[in-house]
Structure formats: C-alpha cells, structure tokens
Amino acid sequence: MTNNNPTWLEINLSAITSNSAALIRETGTPLMAIVKGDAYGHGALQVARAAISGGAQWLGVARFGEARILRQNGIQAPILVLGLALGEEVDEAIARNVTLTLPSRESLEHFSARAKAVGAKLRVHLKVDTGMGRQGVFPDDLLPFAREVQDSGQIIVDGLYSHLAAAEETHAANEIQLERFKKALASLQENGLRPRWVHLANSAAAFYLPQTRFDLVRVGNVVLGLRIRIDQPLPESYLPSLSWKAKLASCRRLPAGWGVGYGLTYIPSGEEWIGVVPVGYGDGLRRMPGNQVIIGGQKCPVVGRLCLDQLMVRLPQAYPMGEEVVIIGQQGDESIRVHDLAAVYQTSQVDVTTLINQRVPHIYV
C-alpha cells in the first residue's frame, strides 16, 4: 500500500511479542503488560495483542475507559485498572470482568454498594502504600482492611500490589518498601487471606530487584523495547519497537545571511542547503535545542525555532522532495532512539512517546 503520509510512526509488533517472551523467560515470572496511555503512544490494542502473543497473562491500564476499548475489541485477558473507577464504571467492570484497584475504605463502600445493586461480585486487587505516598492503605492497616473487604460479601480479592518509588535507582527506599510489603503480605498469609496474584515489580524492579517479582511483573517500557535507564542499554535480546519517519518537503540553497524560522534565531554564515520536514511541536517534538534528524544516513541538526507543523534542518547536500527522514529510528549506520530524545529533553522515554500527537498515523509492521 502506498504511504502518502507526510509523517508517520512505524510500530514493530514482532519486537513487542519478542520482548514479552524474553521478559517472561528471563524473569521466570508471569507478565502484566502495561498498556496505559495508549501503550505510551504505541497503540494499546495492537500492543496488547502483540504482548499476549508473547505470553503476557495480564494487561494493566490506568482508567476504566482504556479497559473498555480492549474488551470491545475482543481482548479477553485479565485486565487490571490501576487508577480510579467511579459510578457506572464499576457496574461495567463487573459486567466485562475487569479487575479494579481497591485502595481505601471509601472505595470499598462505593464498590460494595455498586456490586450489591447489580447483584454480582467485583474482582479487585488491594493496593497497599509502602512508601510511594500516592494511594493505598498503610501496611499495618492491611489485615483489618482485608477482613472488611471479605465481610462485605460483594468483593473477590484476586490480588495485592504496591508501587516502588525509586526502582530505577540504587536507593535505600527500595529495601524499606519491600520489607513493608512482605510484612503486609505475611499478615494476610498467616490469616488465610493471601490472594492469588501478588505483585510489586515494575520494569526497573523486574530487572534489577528480582526479590520483588512475586507472582507478576508489571512492565511497560521493556515490552516496547524502551530502556529502563536512558544511559544503560537493554540486553541485545530486546528490540526497539517504535520508529518515527517523515518525507522531506523541500530543499533549497539559502544565501549567506538569509534567516531561518521564527525570530530569525539562525542565520547561515555562508550558503547552506536547508531542508523543511513536515514535523513540529504540534506532532510531539519539543521546541528545545538539540534536535536532530537522519537523512541520507547522516545525522543533521535542526536549525531555527521548531514550528507547529514543520522543522528546518541543515543538510550536507541537496535531497529530493519525498526523501525519507528519520526522527526516531535507524537509517544506515546512524540511529536516534527514544532514549536519545529523552536525554536531550531531560525527561522520561514514555513522556516522549506518549506526547506524540494522535494526528501522526501509526503503521503496524
């Protein structure tokens, strides 16, 4: 099929399937593939299917609406909603067999009332706050809370989890959180209340803190082939899944002193080939210094201020309209990866990919 898009993402689904299988093999633990935020901009439905093909048993999303889309498109794997669910979403979660997070007594009252009203039981994973300070009951409150949940008669506790705040770092908090979690889990186990699925490890912990793996690892980055730490490569068995490409819109030789872009912040000192690429901050690039693209197998600097829909690039020679330009990916021996942009922007990799605008078409290969 002819690609007439001026810019597009290519998502390699085989890489996602392979990465999922490698994770399961190397951790020896079942996988919950995290596909929240449209799988960090990669496409939740397609990534979910690819991850399941690689052996993922669970999927994790942030909001119930994300789970609804997966169910409406035939995904039958267990899904955990990590965030808030209210009102009729709870009823729909029961009807669609979606598991919700239960982080508080207030949520317990709400869930119980909704489940009683529809005359069916709701599956949940209890959330314990071991030091992230975000959501969940405190470890010392977990046992009485679990008993309240059991006594409600409307809730099936299928899991228990917490979230590590500093798993990407060598931080004393990791051991503290793990010990709090183990103590809380032991209190349930000693009283016959241990649920089937116990999970603590995110992407970083799954790799660097094997003692946190328990019954599931919750992984987003590595399923997609993104690094855990931007300065540390993944093993060669993991493959990047996302490329971002465009077609050169124009190429002209500008005379010395001819300004480029808004504010005329770039003035060629001599004659230069300047190309225009139909990608801008409206597509998700950042209006920050340090952007590059690859064309003709060479990295070339973006010059002048990034526009909403276009960027200008200094080229070593003339190239024809339609020449392939790589924003993220590889061309010849050169590559620009998501972690490279994350380093330039001083942010996380998923911040880069999630903010790529939906107007950039996704092509799955």
Image: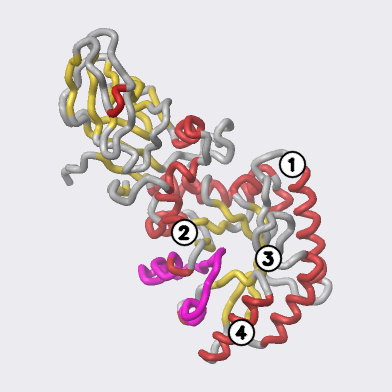
Tell which circle, 2 or 4, labels the residue nearer the N-terminal end: 2
CA–CA distance between discs 3 and 4? 17 Å
Task: Judge by depth and name the residue closer to the eye, 274 or 317.
Answer: 274
Q: Which residue is mark 4?
A: 112
Callout 3 crowding tier (Cα within 10 Å): few <14, some 14–19, many ≥20? many
Tag 1–tag 2 contact (CB < 8 Å)? no
Tell which circle, 1 or 2, labels the residue nearer the N-terminal end: 2
Q: Quadrant of residue 129?
A: bottom right
Task: Judge by depth and name the residue closer to the eye, 133 or 44.
Answer: 133
Q: Position of residue 319 (x, y in %)?
A: 19, 21
- Name the amino acid, label 2: Ile
Q: Is residue 115 left or right of residue 360?
A: right
Q: Position of residue 101 (x, y in %)?
A: 60, 69
- Name the amino acid, label 1: His
CA–CA distance between discs 2 and 4? 31 Å
Q: Secondary structure at mark 3?
A: loop
Q: Which residue is mark 3?
A: 136
- Name the amino acid, label 4: Ser
Q: Position of residue 312 (x, y in %)?
A: 27, 26
Callout 4 crowding tier (Cα within 10 Å): few <14, some 14–19, many ≥20? some
Determine whether 102 is above or below 346 in the image.
below
Tag 1–tag 4 contact (CB < 8 Å)? no
CA–CA distance between discs 2 and 3? 28 Å
What residue span does the magenta drawing correspond to? Answer: 66-92
Tag 2–tag 3 contact (CB < 8 Å)? no
CA–CA distance between discs 1 and 3? 22 Å
Task: Judge by depth and name the residue closer to the eye, 363 or 89.
Answer: 89
